[in-house]
Amino acid sequence: MSMIQNFLRVDSETLDRFLADSRILSNTVYSKESIGLDNLIDIDKAWEGIFFLLTGESIGTYDQAIPPLSWLLVAPNDIDRNQDMGYGPATYTTIEQTRQIHLALQEISPEELRQRFDATTMLEKDIYPDIWDDENALDYLLQYFGDLKTFYRLAATHNEAVVLFLN
């Protein structure tokens, strides 16, 4: 089974509704209508590889990563600790925290990530999804990194919070 990281841009009113009743979140993202949402993206299975290149940490050591980039894997705020979105609860960043992530991501170029990429180390550290010896692995990560940068730019521009969850 695959683990896929999802990001949902929301305005403050929508976030307040999710916080008041977390079922609204699951109904939103797991409905047939979610397929067409332009404020919902997933970065497929690239999430831990991107996180590792950005922070040097894995899912097992994510709490040692430094904010705001550490918030790309597990945001500092919970929607509902008891809700399971597939692989645990959803977390979120506030509008200000989302801006901080956007600014941090803008400082990092694909070339910088290219220089940080080390397939041997990533395989040794068991970074999901264990494809790092594939000749296309880096391009896979860079594609989703670009999508993530665009997503956070849009969130910051529209003064939105971001909800994250693995499913």
Image: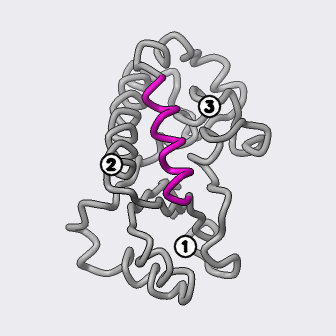
Majority secondary structure in the magenta region? helix
Q: Relative to 62, say whether 125 is above or below.
A: above
**In what element is the residue under mark 3?**
helix
Mark 2 or 3, nearer chain start: 3
- Between the residue at mark 1 and the residue at mark 3, the CA separation in whole angstroms equals 23 Å
Q: Residue at x 42, y 19 (%)?
A: 109
- Between the residue at mark 1 and the residue at mark 2, the CA separation in whole angstroms equals 27 Å
Q: Are marks 2 and 3 in contact (CB under 8 Å)?
A: no
Q: Relative to 83, say whether 158 is above or below.
A: above
The kind of residue tagged 3 is Phe
Disc 1 marks which residue? 85
Mark drawn on residue 52 = 3
Q: Which quadrant would residue 12 be assigned to in this image? A: bottom left
Q: Relative to 62, say whether 20 is above or below.
A: below
Residue 13 place in picture, x, y as percent: 42, 78
The kind of residue tagged 1 is Met
Q: Are marks 1 and 2 in contact (CB under 8 Å)?
A: no
Q: Which quadrant would residue 60 be assigned to in this image? A: top right
Residue 108 place in picture, x, y as percent: 47, 22
Q: Residue furthest toward the left? A: 36
Q: Residue at x 53, y 52 (%)?
A: 96
Task: Please tell me how crowded label 2 is: few (under 14), some (14-19), or many (20+) other residues with Cα within 10 Å.
Answer: few
Q: Are marks 1 and 3 in contact (CB under 8 Å)?
A: no
Disc 2 marks which residue? 157
Mark 1 or 3, nearer chain start: 3
Residue 9 place in picture, x, y as percent: 38, 61
- Between the residue at mark 2 and the residue at mark 3, the CA separation in whole angstroms equals 26 Å
Q: In terms of depth relative to the viewer, which is nearer, 110 or 96?
A: 96
Residue range of the region highlighted in magenta in the rendering: 94-107
Q: Relative to 147, say whether 91 is above or below.
A: below
Q: Residue at x 30, y 61 (%)?
A: 39
Task: Please tell me how crowded label 3 is: few (under 14), some (14-19), or many (20+) other residues with Cα within 10 Å.
Answer: many
